[in-house]
Image (spheres, rainbow, N blue to C red):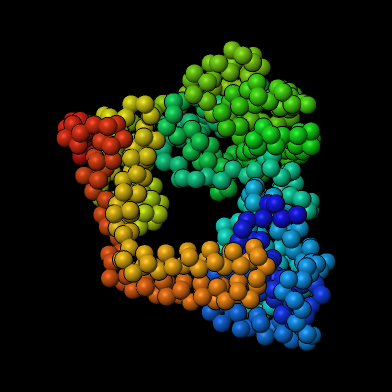
């Protein structure tokens, strides 16, 4: 039953059994699972619960608990019906988010969904709601309100694990011509499926994300104002079954009825021989929907991949119109880097100097021909941020000892849980909590005296490029200097 559960999630259930035994309950109720969650996942608790939440929740639970004699901690207590539903909800949450494993965050969502149970009411007394947790975890499915249905299995009306909403990862800077061409093709009567053709790194996926953002912002022609872009999500071959194909087919039918555009990552993907070995050919299902005009697809391809795809599968050339995406110029790339640097500065807790960005563009153009601009320059900028972040994240020796001791305690706790020695496991869990509090206090003190952010310099960028191409710093510096003249 618990094969998909993470180790942390399994320990929550073990601790839930312990809590049930302490109050003599014949079942593991939702409140026992909640207490197990509070004991096991400290990070999750701190994220959503106020400091005094544990005491408030225990008081709320005690008000709803009948006093009985303790039972043996080794007793094999069954789950109550409510708790079974909680685990079912947790599984659904993981499925809807395309997560392979069921974790503590899914258990928390499951507890909140069983609204009339003691656990949900206890959480509500602390101001914890399903909506707040979804938002805090970044797990709220982003679907167009105009597309929502009442289907319990999928908020968008699409089968899970087949077609998922496309979320823009980065702001689109420039590329207006390519974006306008996509709009022109989507508005055609014939061959109304655009495919962006360009080398690795030119930003094909970002352009499609830019279209999704424009749809969300409402800055598209009226025929696309209610559109949604979803991405074809293909599982590993071993997971593709007859049921999966049935879901995929019905998903395309729903997409056709709702006017949804399907994004296929790499034009050749549905045409690969891999998908011709199943009970139904994926290519044939998609082909029928596209050729008949039931759905519109947007895809991407490299020039070589596009040539091979249309040579092997003539219907692709008849249905798709190519849009050539050339690499960005160095000036355009510098504008891109300046436009997205705040994302990387926040992630790496560091600041990019303008010289660093200029050298990232010039160095990538001069020394990394295998990947096109702006992608190669973005990669250089990202790795330079990582280098500086690692350089500034060296911990003082006492924190290293604390972390080592924490790992030792965690191993002892896990061993006790595996042996159903719940008294011992509870002792180690309490010790772990104390040690973690000490570690957090030590880290907070360290952060107060350590610099908040460091500059990422041109030298950092040049060293990254030199390592990536196995060249000397001086050679890269000379090549970068020759290229950077027109950017200053």
Q: Residue at 76% x, 58% y: name it.
A: 88
Task: Point out residue 3 in the picture as x, y percentages from the top left corner.
Answer: 70, 52
Query: Would residue 372 appear left or right of 256 to someone viewing this image?
Result: left
Question: Visible in this render: residue 323?
Answer: no
State the residue in front, 410 or 111.
Answer: 410
- Tell me the quarter of the picture where residue 105 sits: bottom right
Query: Would residue 345 appear left or right of 483 to someone viewing this image?
Result: right
State the residue in front, 82 or 252.
Answer: 82
Quadrant that contains the C terminus: top left
State the residue in front, 442 or 482.
Answer: 442
Question: Visible in this render: residue 23?
Answer: yes
Task: Point out residue 213 in the picture as x, y percentages from the top left corner.
Answer: 54, 45
Q: How many labels does the image show?
A: 0
- Tell me the quarter of the picture where residue 226 sits: top right
Up/down of 121 relative to 253, above or below: below
Q: Residue at 53% x, 63% y: name it.
A: 411
Task: Point out residue 231 in the picture as x, y percentages from the top left corner.
Answer: 62, 38
- Tell me the quarter of the picture where residue 106 sits: bottom right
Q: Residue at 40% x, 54% y: name it.
A: 347
Up/down of 183 relative to 169, above or below: above
State the residue in front, 384 or 291.
Answer: 384
Q: Residue at 70% x, 22% y: name it.
A: 276
Quadrant that contains the N terminus: bottom right
């Amino acid at each position: 039953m618990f094969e998909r559960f993470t180790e942390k999630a399994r320990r929550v259930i073990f601790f839930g059994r312990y809590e049930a035994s302490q109050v003599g309950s014949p079942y593991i109720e939702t409140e026992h699972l909640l207490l197990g969650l509070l004991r096991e996942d400290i990070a999750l608790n701190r994220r959503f619960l106020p400091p005094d939440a544990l005491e408030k929740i225990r008081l709320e639970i005690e008000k709803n608990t009948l006093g009985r004699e303790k039972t043996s901690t080794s007793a094999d207590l069954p789950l109550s019906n409510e708790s079974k539903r909680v685990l079912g909800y947790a599984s659904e949450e993981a499925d809807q988010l395309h997560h392979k494993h069921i974790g503590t965050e899914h258990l928390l969502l499951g507890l909140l969904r069983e609204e009339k149970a003691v656990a949900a009411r206890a959480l509500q007394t602390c101001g914890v709601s399903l909506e707040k947790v979804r938002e805090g975890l970044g797990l709220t499915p982003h679907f167009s309100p105009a597309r929502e249905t009442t289907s319990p299995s999928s908020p968008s009306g699409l089968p899970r694990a087949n077609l998922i909403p496309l979320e823009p990862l980065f702001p689109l800077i420039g590329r207006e011509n390519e974006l306008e061409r996509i709009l022109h093709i989507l508005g055609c009567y014939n061959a109304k499926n655009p495919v962006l053709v360009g080398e690795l790194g030119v930003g094909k996926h970002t352009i499609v994300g830019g279209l999704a953002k424009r749809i969300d912002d409402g800055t598209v022609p009226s025929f696309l104002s209610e559109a949604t872009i979803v991405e074809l999500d293909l599982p590993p071959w071993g997971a593709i079954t007859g049921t999966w194909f049935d879901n995929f087919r019905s998903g395309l039918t729903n997409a056709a009825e709702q006017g949804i555009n399907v994004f296929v990552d790499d034009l050749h993907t549905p045409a690969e021989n891999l998908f011709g070995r199943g009970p139904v050919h994926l290519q044939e299902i998609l082909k029928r929907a596209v050729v008949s005009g039931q759905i519109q697809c947007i895809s991407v391809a490299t020039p070589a991949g596009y040539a091979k795809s249309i040579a092997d599968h003539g219907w692709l050339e008849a249905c798709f119109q190519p849009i050539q995406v050339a690499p960005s110029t160095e000036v355009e790339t510098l504008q891109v880097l300046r436009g997205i640097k705040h994302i990387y500065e926040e992630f790496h807790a560091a600041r990019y100097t303008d010289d660093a960005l200029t050298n990232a563009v010039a160095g990538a153009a001069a020394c990394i021909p295998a990947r096109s601009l702006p992608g190669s320059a973005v990669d250089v900028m990202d790795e330079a941020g990582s280098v500086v972040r690692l350089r500034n994240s060296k911990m003082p020796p006492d924190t290293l000892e604390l972390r080592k001791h924490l790992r030792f305690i965690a191993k002892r706790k896990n061993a006790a849980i595996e042996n159903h020695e719940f008294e011992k496991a509870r002792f180690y869990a309490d010790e772990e909590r104390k040690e973690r509090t000490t570690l957090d206090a030590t880290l907070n003190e360290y952060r107060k005296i350590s610099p908040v952010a460091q500059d990422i310099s041109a030298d950092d960028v040049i060293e990254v490029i030199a390592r990536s191409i196995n060249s000397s710093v001086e050679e890269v510096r000379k090549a970068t200097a020759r290229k950077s003249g027109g950017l200053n």
